[in-house]
Amino acid sequence: MRLLVTGGAGFIGTNFLRYALARDEVERLVTVDLLTYAGNYANLNDLEADPRFRFVRADIADREAMTALVDAEAIDTLVNCAAETHVDRSIADHWPFVTTNVDGTLVLLEAVRGRAGFRRFLQVSTDEVFGSIPAGRATEDWPSRPSSPYAASKAAADGFVQAYATTYGLPAVITRSSNNYGPYQFPEKLIPLFVTNALDGQPLPLYGDGLNERDWIHVEDHCAALWHVLGLPATRGEVFNVSAGREVPNRAVTDLILRLLDRPPSLVRYVADRPGHDRRYALDASRLRKTGWEPRRGFEEGLAATVAWYREHRPWWEAVKSGAYRDYYETMYGDRLRDSSAAPRS
Ligand code: NAD
Ligand code: TYD
């Protein structure tokens, strides 16, 4: 396999590179990453020793660079992890989401379309394209009803992947995973933000009433699912949901983190809600399970391991939380925390 993984310096990309490099089938592994605020080259330092590995700093929306790279490296498999990924940032400014998530995906699709020997395009997508799931679990056939600009950009990209599969016969597949947690996640997302804030005795800003639910999966289970999907017979834009089937209200996640770190509940601050905040995500992953994949990590055990990782990797997240992150935090949370309460918002 001559594999191109985009976004390898991000959370899921970094974990997936490690997963793939542990496999003998991988003859070459190239990762492209623009190193935006969310990309961290330090994550990849230890991979450089592997002669199969190469890092390229580039923008997936750069047509010439992507076409030249795919040709030069004779890429036969592409896993697209690069994206702008944070819902709150997409509410503040959606343009980078359109450029990277939509244009960038199209550029990658064009770079591999019609390539002799090209085997598989895997689009790493999200359950957020479905919007809020009021009850039950969404199967792959659930309609796309994205709520945030982030989710809308991912739904648009999925549409282009399916169009390329249908119109040009591109061997493509889409995975839609639920919320991931684990090592190397940027501390703007709920779990690493709350764990690192709690470690520093800082407030934990819970949105709204704190009862929104997310369907949590450990990033290693997601990486195993991506690898598994690469081995399934070629599909024409088929979708596979990826979920461990465990939705948890944000308040319960917060309580668990506080308990694991032995920090007081008084750190919790209820702050103004996110506009358009999806109430609940819950996926039905039986299509993927029937092909032989299953998640291995339970939420409580996985969360404890994740909390331990952040506790042991303080230099990693302290570096990430310095500099521009401080401005981001003040913009997102400054006023909200000044206007926060210890009791849930109705
Ligand atoms: P992340 O924000 O941690 O990492 C994204 C990476 O993409 C960063 O390294 C960044 O530098 C890179 N990048 C951004 N714009 C780029 C560009 N124009 N060109 C090249 N590289 C660029 O994100 P993540 O959590 O690792 O998510 C990876 C993928 O998985 C995304 O497509 C996301 O939609 C999807 N996903 C994530 C989750 C989750 O819970 N994290 C769940 C489901 C699906
Ligand atoms: P997040 O990690 O941003 O993932 P997503 O919104 O893409 O699912 O948020 C997970 C949940 O946690 C979501 O319901 C919003 C909530 N949340 C907070 O309550 N406070 C926060 O500071 C953040 C970042 C998220």
Image: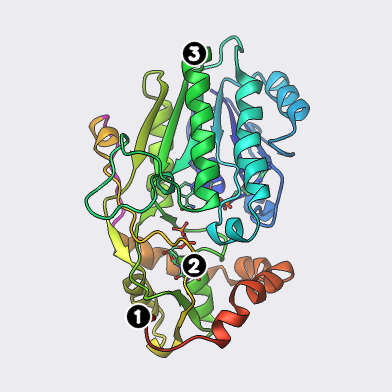
Badge 3 crowding class, 10 Å Cα cut-off, few under 14, some 14 to 19, many 20 or more, is some
Question: How far is disc 3 from disc 2 in space, using C-alphas?
Answer: 40 Å
Q: Residue at x 73, y 67 (%)?
A: 324
Task: Specify the quadrant that holds the C terminus.
Answer: bottom left
Q: Earlier in the sequence, mark 3 or mark 2?
A: 3
For residue 304, side relative to residue 53 (left or right): left
- Closer to the camera: disc 2 or disc 1? 2
- Closer to the camera: disc 3 or disc 2? 2
Relative image position of residue 45 (x, y in whole percent): 67, 50
Q: Which residue is mark 3?
A: 169
Q: Which mark is residue 246?
A: none
Q: Is residue 197 visible to the viewer in this orientation of the structure?
A: yes
Q: Earlier in the sequence, mark 2 or mark 1?
A: 1
Question: How far is disc 3 from disc 1 in space, using C-alphas?
Answer: 51 Å
Q: Earlier in the sequence, mark 3 or mark 1?
A: 3
- Closer to the camera: disc 3 or disc 1? 3
Relative image position of residue 214 (x, y in whole percent): 35, 59
Relative image position of residue 236 (x, y in whole percent): 42, 19
- Mark 1: which amino acid? Arg
- Mark 2: which amino acid? Arg
Relative image position of residue 284 (x, y in whole percent): 26, 43
Q: Nearer the viewer, residue 230 or 337?
A: 337
Q: Residue furthest top?
A: 116
- Which region shows up in magenta? 291-298
Question: How far is disc 2 from disc 1 in space, using C-alphas?
Answer: 26 Å
- Mark 3: which amino acid? Gly
Element on which disc 1 rests: helix
Q: Which residue is mark 1?
A: 259
Q: Which mark is residue 274?
A: 2
188 part of magenta stretch: no
Q: From the Cβ of disc 2, is ligand 2 less than 8 Å away?
A: yes
Q: Can you say whether 50 is above or below 109 in the image?
A: below
